[in-house]
Amino acid sequence: MAKIDPQLAKDVKKRRTFAIIAHPDAGKTTLTEKLLLFGGAIQMAGAVKGRKAARHATSDWMEVEQQRGISVTSSVMQFEYDNHVINLLDTPGHEDFSEDTYRVLTAVDAAVMVIDAAKGVEAQTIKLLEVCRLRNTPIITFINKLDREVRDPIDLISEIEEILKLECVPITWPIGMGKTFRGVFSLEKDQLVRFTPGEARVSEDAELIQGLDNPRLDELFPLEMGFVRESIELMQGVSNPFDIEKFLAGEQSPVFFGSGVNNFGVKDVLEALVKWAPDPLPRDGGARQVEPTEQPFTGFVFKIQANMDPKHRDRIAFFRVCSGRYTQGMKVRHLRENRDMKIPNALTFMANDRVSMTDAVAGDIIGIYNHGQLHIGDTLTEGENLGFTGIPYFAPELFRAARAKDPFKAKQLQKGLKELGEEGAIQVFEGEFGNLLLGAVGFLQFEIVAQRLATEYKVDAIYENTDVSTARWLSFPNEDVKKRFTDEQATRLAHDADGNLVYLATSIYNLQTTQKHWPDVEFHTTREKNQTFGE
Ligand code: G4P
């Protein structure tokens, strides 16, 4: 066992790396901003918000994307809180970019789930939680907007438990809601945390009221306390106590109630992150498990932001450090390309600024400038042959055939789509005759890709409808089955960007029929980077 550098171990222990997951409008942007304010990372409320507002409409979103500097700096935010270094990774709000979100989630060690207390569990929450589940990511739940007329807390908790199959343990409990929202009772500290609308922070000199049966509570909230005590009793009768092991296994979630916009409950979330969320976790490096306190530097790329400067075709690869320490100018091994490369100048992201990074350890995210050498899922080490796993690709649900308007520009189109595919902006499949098929999770992806092909690759793409309605990655029990299947189904097959064989179904019915005919063939709805099918 290699010797552990005590300073490295100490620095790693201080890291917390997480993302906020939420259905659009639940309050993710607001919470992000308040968390940053608490961490002292931004002075001005509205900085994050402004960016989001601009993203709302497609055209605005593109404009923002043109000044990509903004969105890049905001993709990762690092700030300090209570002697810890917190890395908050932003996930795109629009559901059409959910693939991006999934990949970001592979780079975190915990997630904060925001639920709108008036709406409960929503469609996007369900999808995001499924992804967290792939890696058993520990989840802290924040039930937001208690300053509005919302649903009964017991109702909300049961809904989360039933739909998301996630055991909930309320750590705070709301007193009233909407106009009569009085605050929360902390079941952990056994005391009242009072809410005063409009007050930015809970005042330090607030009266300390300890104990749920404290008569002072009845004096203050004569109308509410009966119901509150009843609900807490009911809830505690059916729920288990908080169990850190279950939380770390992604099976149980501590729940906080609050109002992000009023800064209420935000501190609870930060405290829970510091106290309970794991410090950087070991990662599956393919050949072996990599511990965060190991001395050699390792990590993987989980996101690419390309063509920051169209003249230079540069890209920033967002890289999660999994072990060791990044030092400026260090030489690393690029495993996929099997060659060495230097990282002369990595970036870190302090809320609104890009700062040159001189030191990073496991849990931190660094931005590496490159000219296309780095792809999503790439592993860098100091020489060891590893391949971090877990970057998911999902079978797209929307398809378009693509061709260049000007046939002489077919090559440019191919190049552009290859690069945008590598960046993860869209999935690109190549059919038997070299025909290109684009697969997306959301319609907006097609639009963005067309626009970027025009501006960055100077090629106008024409999209055409296809008969493809869904795709599945394939794996075969042996070469014989593979040959018979590929011969029979040739017209319905294509290769993805990494050369994996994909079945293109015209409908779910068509897919089911084919599956029935070929019981030995496996049809996969997701694949992981560094995982190959079809062997
Ligand atoms: P998102 O990133 O998850 O999409 O949500 P965002 O934070 O942008 O919040 C969505 C809306 O909900 C915003 O209102 C925001 O102000 C509001 N909101 C967030 N937290 C709370 C809360 O605790 N209480 C209440 N009452 N509202 C909250 P908007 O009308 O879309 O924008 P704005 O006009 O308020 O800026």
Image (tube, helix red, strand yellow):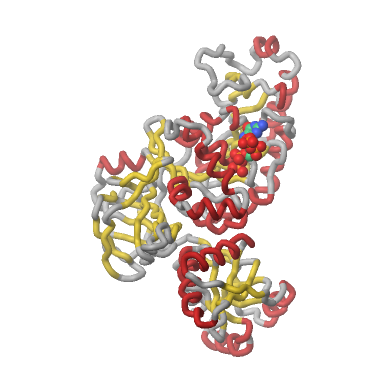
Compared across the picture, whether 339 is left or right of 190 comes to left
Quarter of image, res 30: top right
Q: Is residue 240 above or below residue 391?
A: above
Q: Residue at x 44, y 60 (%)?
A: 306
- Picture residue at 55% right of the left edge, 39% below the top: 49
Residue 166 showing in the rendered view: yes
Q: From where the camera sits, is residue 251 visible?
A: no
Quarter of the image holding residue 17? top left
Q: Is residue 223 left or right of residue 446?
A: right
Residue 479 to residue 129: above or below:
below
Location of residue 331 by image quarter? bottom left
What residue is rendered at 62% in x and 51% in y?
57
Q: How many marks?
A: 0
* Left or right for 509, reference 274: right
> In terms of depth relative to the viewer, which is nearer, 221 or 37?
37
Q: Position of residue 340 (x, y in %)?
A: 26, 66
Residue 166 higher or lower than 264, as above or below: below
Closer to the camera, 212 or 465? Answer: 465
Which quadrant of the frame does ligand 1 lie within?
top right
| Residue closer to the observer: 150 or 27 | 27
Q: Residue 113, how many percent across, how many down?
A: 58, 42
Horizontal and vertical percent position of residue 471: 62, 72
Residue drawn at point x = 72 percent, y = 23 percent: 179
**Residue 68 x/y as whole percent:** 46, 52
Q: Nearer the viewer, residue 354 or 213?
A: 354
